[in-house]
Image (cartoon, rainbow, N blue to C red):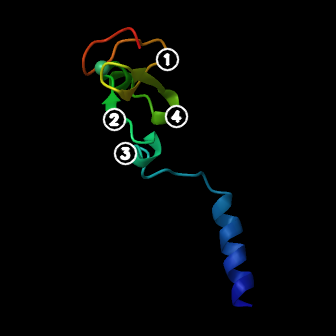
């Protein structure tokens, strides 16, 4: 019976809006060893979540930065050539 009660609680929890308490800190381990160059000031200004930002590769920094889809300039070194 205990198992049944736990399953019922799990099912109810699944119907609630999913929250991502860890969403503000990107899991750096998923970047596969690349440098995390952070998020652009524009993306922060727009209040974009990580799901709304795009990862951009910077060959000069050898890392990935996250920003608005149309942004092209690395926030660390200013490189616009990817
Ligand atoms: Zn760069």
Q: For the residue carrying disc 1, how many other residues have a C-alpha within 10 Å: few (<14), some (14-19), or many (20+)? A: few
Instruction: Describe the element under mark 3 as helix, strand or loop.
Output: loop
* Label 4 to label 3: alpha-carbon separation: 12 Å
Q: Position of residue 44 (x, y in %)?
A: 34, 27
Q: Which disc, if any, is residue 69?
A: 1
Q: Give me the residue at 40% from left, 43% from top.
A: 26
Q: For the residue carrying disc 3, how many other residues have a C-alpha within 10 Å: few (<14), some (14-19), or many (20+)? A: few
**Pick the front one: 17 or 64:** 64
* Label 4 to label 1: alpha-carbon separation: 11 Å
Q: Earlier in the sequence, mark 2 or mark 3?
A: 3
Q: Quadrant of residue 23?
A: top left
Instruction: Describe the element under mark 4 as helix, strand or loop.
Output: helix
Outermost residue toward the bottom? 1
Q: Position of residue 11 (x, y in %)?
A: 71, 67
Mark 4 — residue?
51
Instruction: Describe the element under mark 1 as helix, strand or loop.
Output: loop
């Amino acid at each position: 019976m205990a198992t049944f009660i736990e399953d019922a609680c799990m099912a109810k929890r699944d119907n609630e809006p999913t929250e991502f308490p860890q969403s503000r800190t990107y899991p750096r381990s998923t970047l596969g060893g690349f440098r995390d160059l952070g998020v652009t000031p524009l993306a922060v200004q727009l209040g974009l979540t990580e799901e709304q930002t795009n990862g951009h590769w910077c060959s000069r920094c050898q890392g990935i930065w996250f920003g608005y889809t149309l942004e092209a300039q690395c926030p660390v070194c200013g490189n616009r050539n990817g």
